[in-house]
Image (cartoon, rainbow, N blue to C red):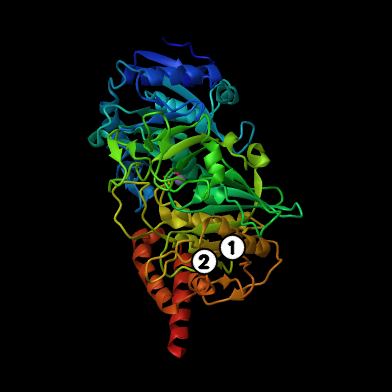
Amino acid sequence: MTTPAPTQHAALIRWVEESAKLTRPDAIVWCDGSEAEKKKFTAEAVAAKVLIPLDQKKWPNCYYHHSNQNDVARVEHLTVICTPTKDEAGPTNNWMAPAEAYAKLTAIYDGCMKGRTMYVVPYIMGPATSPFSKVGVELTDSVYVALNMGIMTRMGKVALDRLGKDGEFNKGLHSVADCSPDRRWICHFPQDNTIWSVGSGYGGNALLGKKCLALRIGSALARKEGWLAEHMLILEAESPKGEKQYVAAAFPSACGKTNFAMMIPPQTFSGWKIRTVGDDIAWMRVGADGRLWAVNPENGYFGVAPGTNRKTNPNAMDSVRKDSLFTNVARTKDGDIWWEGWDTEAPDELIDWKGDVWKKGSKDKAAHPNSRFTAPAANNPALSPSVDDPKGVPISALIFGGRRSTTVPLVMEAFNWTHGVYMGATMGSETTAAAVGLKEGVRRDPMAMLPFIGYDAGSYLQHWLDMQQRIPNPPKVYLVNWFRKSQDGKFLWPGYGDNMRVLKWILDRAAGRVGAQETLLGNTPRAGDLDLTGVAATPEQVAAATRIDLGEWQAELESQAEWFEKLGKTLPRPISLQRDLLLERVKAARAVT
Ligand code: OXD
Ligand code: MN
């Protein structure tokens, strides 16, 4: 059944018609975002075996999805920025000329929706009435994608209402097509405000509002319009006195952003409340008061399942209790779910993420390491009431953090904005399962945005530097590392809720309530500044987690040369000079010790 276009936006109607002429779906359905529609889509997905109902008593309105086994993560090698020139995409992005990309994908899209329905998914990234927000429309032949977009964005009538008769919107065309890795492309055309994605149904490749619009196209728009589109969670911290502060923090994919955004402070921090504004993306603009203000463009969580449990992240476990989708976790025959790092041991038998019988003791993982939950933000018991505030929340501190088993201490404060941008620019992280085909080891991941910067990376860093002029009251900048290990490979810092101890120091610094030790590489907490009451780590472990080893740092700074070389001629000189300065300092200090 084809539904009539519920809009008078002529350009939108024309584009839907043109796209349908190319892809030739059997039906076109305009999504309104209603509960009735969600029920109908879900029933259709169940009938088509795209979704499997979970035990509805235990998991109300929750469903399971097995992806195609070749389609389990983002595909950075097939993700392309199609700017008019290669230089505009820069050395860290794949590039294709727009005409070539349009031609290549047109051939794949030709007739690809025959026998299928095209869902027209209008959505808003950001609160419905916020000046920060952007509208997109995704055309997709995947009911799974339409249902996920309904959780992750403000979807349907609300978006068409905001668009009116002639509002600007991002045009996203998506087809799973034959789901072949040989015909899989995620192409971005920032100059046309357009995304073409084909051959994958995986979240980061197919939910076009998320990585494609909110980050890749978003970062290009942000540069043009003078704001920041970042891969950052946004967290609200309320002190026992009722004072609220907000921080935004960038971590690479699968490095605990959702856990940090939903943290439960240790018992010794009684009276402190941590609430979530966002767990993955922050759009930040300068407010009339000269501070940086942030909104979360998303409306749900697309979180990594393994490792999430009632101890590590009770708020995430509550968020997924109802109205959620689970992709590639393990399930039981009677509609329960399980994943590695669940609260209890695996049952004797499971159906693994591939759909095969899995027996306890098997050396294979039952859930895919990048298996995911999609949960509505409204389910989060610790959701900040400011999440829908059209003006956003004021940011007191920006935090950058990678997964580093050596060198990087638990926390370090930048001396100033330029040093902070340098810290973000040189952030390294050990690779995870969130993207396929990455070499193991440390990769430089500037601001955790390496796979998401929609233009030349050197120019992106220059944009960060330029923002200083626009932010009279800038947030302080921090580098953190929860993942440092001992010689025998054990984590030195307990992480999770104990990260509150580091956050508290950051919040106090931002408010000018506590001092710091100036080191060669940045400001660190002085002895006694971190509240370690009741921490599950020995003083030796804490010392090792916070230690700055100049030998390790010399190697770290020297190794950044290769990264700077890769960034090439647009690397801002103030950034490379930061490294030179630190390296000289470290060498001089080592020479006298
Ligand atoms: C994500 C990612 O899904 O960063 O958020 O891969
Ligand atoms: Mn992410």
- Which comes sooner in the sequence, label 1 or label 2? 2
Q: Nearer the viewer, residue 157 or 527?
A: 527
593 on left or right of 394: left
Amino acid at circle 1: Val
101 on left or right of 140: left
Q: Residue 335, position in %: x, y?
A: 41, 29
- Pointer 1 local density, CA inside 10 Å: few below 14, some 14–19, many at least 20: many
At 55% from the left and 45% from the top, the residue drawn is 314
Confirm whether residue 457 shows in the render.
yes
- As helix, strand or loop, the secondary structure at mark 2 comes to loop
Q: Residue 393, position in %: x, y?
A: 66, 46
Question: Which mark identifies residue 410?
Answer: 2
Q: Residue 333, position in %: x, y?
A: 36, 29
Marks 1 and 2, Cα distance to the nearest angstrom? 8 Å
At 57% from the left and 47% from the top, the residue drawn is 262
Q: Residue 397, position in %: x, y?
A: 61, 57
407 on left or right of 102: right
Residue lying furthest bottom? 592
Q: Nearer the viewer, residue 232 or 218?
A: 232
Above or below, comparing residue 258 to residue 350 in the picture: below
Question: Which mark identifies residue 502?
Answer: 1
Q: Is mark 2 within 8 Å of ligand 2?
A: no
At 43% from the left and 33% from the top, the residue drawn is 336
Above or below, comparing residue 251 to residue 490 in the picture: above
- Pointer 2 local density, CA inside 10 Å: few below 14, some 14–19, many at least 20: many
- As helix, strand or loop, the secondary structure at mark 1 comes to helix
Amino acid at circle 2: Leu
Residue lying furthest right? 241
491 on left or right of 526: left
